[in-house]
Amino acid sequence: MRIATWLILLASAVAAADSTKLDKIAEDVLTAQLPQVPRAADDDDAHRRARYTKDTVLLGSREQTVGETPEDYVDLIPTIGSVQVDHSRITSLVAGGDQSVMWYTSDVAAEYSGAAEGVGEFHNSATHRITQVAVRDGKGWKVVASLIGLEGGAMSGGAPGDVAGATAAGPLAPLLASPKAIAAVLSADPRTFVLGTEKGERAIGPAAAKKLLTSWAKLSLVVDGKVREVETKSYGVVQAHVKWTKGKDTHWMDAMLVAVPASNNTWKVVGVHYANLR
């Protein structure tokens, strides 16, 4: 009995150590993407692109894939006019995965200054919610999918177009229109997360995640337009626009769902993020 107890404690300690290490790796990967003033030596177009694949979609930031984005416009945190991000920092982060693929969600505080049409000179701050999937690429990591939930909502209003780099919809896309279906296939991983468009809609762990999903069960949602869905042997991810009909009103959200392969060719959801309600 003592040996069994010791082995359980040892396994728990190893899992905790692995989680801490993964958090640090994810923090480093995300921090490298965050803008600062003065700009870092490696904060140029070539280095920015090197942090992603050419097919990566920075949903909520840009309407193109990284490969299609014009020079000097690969920005994780979007701005308008002469506005710049003076400083940005991670305030919270939760990561899952292993040494070959990881997914994480983070709150990032950003401070802005500059001028914008109709606003003039200003200083402001905001906290944005960022979810990403990254894969090991040689000695480093590349982000393959990203969603930023902007505190002020989407950069533009109205019905969005298709997601950049659109693919055929697979088994994951329909889940985004059914919180109940997501709840039924949630992973038991303690770092499973569910995020909504409101600041308080943040649930970490399967119990809290299922509770939040249940609160959305009666929403009238539909995946709108073409999606980007990728499935590999180690992860699956879908990025889409979701339409929410509420009485006579219609709203849209950006959405991203992350899953891992399970038995019998099924999937377990480890993270879902709805953002940028408009």
Image (cartoon, rainbow, N blue to C red):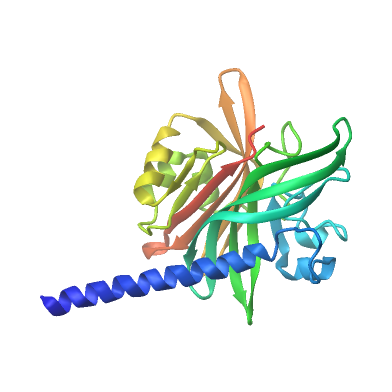
How many numbered discs? 0
Task: Tell me if residue 77 comes above or below residue 220 in the rendering.
Answer: below
Locate residue 229 relative to residue 3 in the image: left or right.
right
Residue 98 rendering spot, x and y as whole percentages = 48, 72
Q: Foreground: 91 or 138?
A: 91
Q: Identify which residue is drawn at 37% across, 40% down.
A: 211
Task: Tell me if residue 116 comes above or below residue 91 in the rendering.
Answer: above
Residue 52 rendering spot, x and y as whole percentages = 71, 66
- Asked if one can make out residue 167 in the rendered structure from this viewpoint, the answer is no
Q: Identify which residue is drawn at 70% across, 56% down.
A: 57
Q: In which quadrant of the rendered view does residue 81 lie? A: top right
Q: Foreground: 174 or 48?
A: 48
Residue 112 rendering spot, x and y as whole percentages = 76, 46
Q: Foreground: 6 or 232?
A: 6
Q: Identify which residue is drawn at 60% across, 41% down.
A: 275
Q: Quadrant of the C terminus?
A: top right
Task: Tell me if residue 225 comes above or below residue 38 in the rendering.
Answer: above
Q: Quadrant of the N terminus?
A: bottom left
Q: Which residue of the protein is positioned furthest toward the bottom in this rendering?
A: 139
Q: Which residue of the protein is positioned furthest toward the left in this rendering?
A: 1
Q: Foreground: 177 or 125?
A: 125
- Asked if one can make out residue 160 in the rendered structure from this viewpoint, the answer is yes
Residue 241 rendering spot, x and y as whole percentages = 64, 42
Q: In which quadrant of the rendered view does residue 141 lie? A: bottom right
Task: Tell me if residue 30 comes above or below residue 181 in the rendering.
Answer: below
Q: Identify which residue is drawn at 72% across, 47% down.
A: 111
